[in-house]
Image: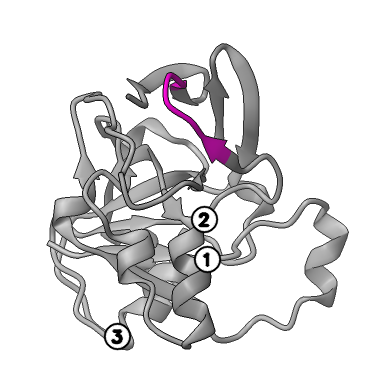
Amino acid sequence: MKILAIGKNYIKDKSELEAIDKGFQMIFSKPESSLLTNNKDLVYPEFTSKLVYEAELVIKIGKTGKHINITDASDYISDIAIGIDYTAKDVLNQVREGKGPWELAKGFDGAAPISGFLPVSNFKDLNDINFSLTINNEEKQVGNTDFMIYNFAEIIAFTSQFMTLNPGDLIFTGTPAFGTGESVKGDHLQAYIEGELLLDFKVI
């Protein structure tokens, strides 16, 4: 199973899209060991003092595909969940100085808490899905897929030009353009899709 993610994929205002030169997408990966499932609590990593959260919708691939046509790409989605793309920001800053890879900052154990999945058939319009994140009962992030720079189909079509996508592969599809911040011990995170609470855990 592959866990892929796209960076910088949301705009704050729809007018911004006209000025963006869409082209090469920024895709990175996380190891399977980074997954945190079943609403298990996240143990704050000992090697960082700056743990940054990003709430994202996660799509699951339902069938094998390579060089997928964009018009067919949405058919490769079987389920949708919500997750947190965690970054050890101080570690990331260190590796950036040496122009190194992101794995240590993005792929540590627990770096990808994820909810249970909902069938894609539950969603009438993949370009109009609402999701949100609250921390300690305070709303921190609100997103809608209509504000994506690259939609689900574009992400799948682009990624499949480089690698075969297989059933069970997961893609974190980007975080809203505002509201990211730091997690601290004791935080209670709850993430929703269309108002339904799906992800519920604490940082301990």
Badge 1: residue crowd in 10 Å (few <14, some 14–19, many ≥20): few
Q: Position of residue 59 (x, y in %)?
A: 34, 50
Residue 167 position by quadrant: bottom left
Q: Secondary structure at mark 2?
A: loop
> Which quarter of the rendering shows the C terminus?
top left
Q: Position of residue 192 (x, y in %)?
A: 47, 24
- Residue at 36% x, 26% y: name it: 203
- Provide the residue span drawn in magenta: 182-189
For the residue marked with disc 1, what is the amino acid? Gly
Mark 1 or mark 2, which has the lower sequence index?
Answer: 1
Badge 2: residue crowd in 10 Å (few <14, some 14–19, many ≥20): many
Residue 24 belongs to the span the image colors magenta = no
Q: Position of residue 56 (x, y in %)?
A: 47, 45
Q: Which mark is residue 19?
A: none
Q: Position of residue 24 (x, y in %)?
A: 54, 86
Mark 3 to mark 1: distance in Å?
A: 21 Å
For the residue marked with disc 3, what is the amino acid? His
Residue 115 shows in this picture: yes
Is mark 1 in CB contact (under 8 Å) with mark 2? yes
Quickly name the residue at label 1.
Answer: 7
